[in-house]
Amino acid sequence: MRYFLLSKLIISTVLLIFNKIILSNYLTGISLDTDELVDKSKWINLENIKPKPDFILNNYPIKSGNNIMFLDEFVGNFYINSFDTILKKWDINHYINNVQPEKINSPLDILTNWISDEKTGKSYLTPTFLSDNVLIFDTINMLLSSSASNPASLTTNPSEASLLSYDKYAQVLISNGQILFIGGQLDDNVKRSMDNLLIYDTINDTWQTMNTTGNAPEPRIYHTAVSTPDGRVIVFGGVSKESVPALPHLSVLDTSKTPYDWSTPTVENPIGAFSGHSSIMVDNHYMISLFVNSFSSDIYKLNVSDPLKYKWSLLAKSSDNDDNSVNNASTTFSINNSFTPIQTEISAVASSSFNEDISRVRLAIIMIFVILLLACISILVYYKKKQKDKDSTNDEKEKNVA
């Protein structure tokens, strides 16, 4: 597994694609208001920072202040691997002793991101089945718990909720403590309409749905969503069906209105259709998006300071072909706003390969554990038998003496 730290541009959260991580928490020498590019010389390979985790089973990070945490579970025990972005060091295999209730049905293998609330220090891992509860990790008190409610209460027949899946959505936390589930896919590959949102209230631990107003974008999967301080939710990318980009590529949901309202902004320098990418909000005025394919992992920024006009530009280029110009890199994804199918295909292949690697690691650990357990049992049985034989011999000698 490879980890990369961008030393000059350290963003306020994490961008994670496959097994690559970009960590940040301060800006030094680089202004997002200019077109200055971050070059390769400012990347540091975290493989050289030791001690480091041998592996991370769960590939979705938790943001906690200056730390990036990875929560994993093995044989019912939960532990944290944490990277300090200031000290640039790992704190590995820190076990979580405070788990409520003691037994949690861990959903750590579900394919959703942790949603972190910087104000409370709590992070939320949302379910992919309507009968599952939300996993809640308090990074301040190191407390792991689960919600008392789940979306099954919203179904017409809650007893059948365990059969209903909902995944590939984009989830985003807004200022009132709500987590919005945008788009995504239901059972039988049915895309969820974008004009009806599933909402989890993190403050009251309740669920609801809301019908939106305005011109809702096309249903989609493999998209991202970020929120701004003034109540806008910016939705970018995704596909409406296999290899077909969902339109429009960029949409805005205004959560300062009730009900929430969709609109399509004017976009300068569009970069075309993305899917399977990551996006975060930085410095309140910029959305940073990372897309990784077989030859590059380019990072783009979107200036959202003007609610009526949004502007894309290239922030950092990480390509094996250094001779390519910045303009050519941008054009790769923006000729006639055409969609490049390899983006989705590569994402799926890489994700599948990564999950297979994780499964192999889990299997190897379980096998080692079983072998050690059997060895301990064999040794115990051997010594008990030896002691029994010794006792029998002593009894026989005592009888002979008598």
Image (cartoon, rainbow, N blue to C red):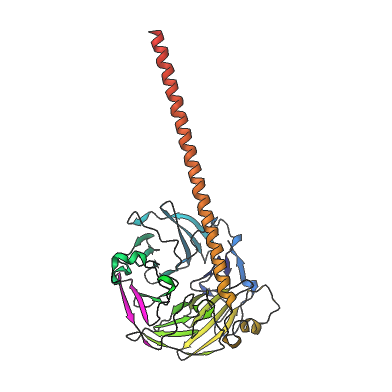
Give the image quarter of residue 64.
Answer: bottom left
Q: Is residue 218 left or right of residue 19?
A: left
Residue 340 in the image, given as x and y percentages of width and height: 59, 79
Is 143 colored magenta in this rendering?
no
Residue beneath the point at 34% across and 62% down: 146
Image quarter where the N terminus lies is: bottom right
Residue beneath the point at 53% across and 50% down: 364
Q: Looking at this rendering, what residue extends furthest in the right direction?
A: 323
Is 192 colored magenta in this rendering?
yes
Residue 283 in the image, given as x and y percentages of width and height: 48, 79
How many numbered markers are drawn?
0
Decide if residue 88 is in sight here: no
Residue 390 in the image, given as x and y percentages of width and height: 44, 21
Q: Is residue 264 left or right of residue 206?
A: right
Viewer-closest of 92 and 238:
238
Viewer-closest of 70 and 190:
190
Give the image quarter of residue 268.
Answer: bottom right
- Up the image or down, 369 lies above or below 311; here it is above
- Up the image or down, 62 lies above or below 240; here it is above
Q: Is residue 195 left or right of residue 267?
A: left
- Up the image or down, 168 lies above or below 74; here it is below
Q: Looking at this rendering, what residue extends furthest in the top direction?
A: 402
Residue stretch in magenta:
191-219
Residue 55 in the image, given as x and y percentages of width and height: 54, 57
Viewer-closest of 95 and 192:
192
- Up the image or down, 57 lies above or below 206; here it is above
Give the image quarter of residue 351.
Answer: bottom right
Residue beneath the point at 58% across and 71% down: 346
Decide if residue 105 is in sight here: yes
Image quarter where the C terminus lies is: top left
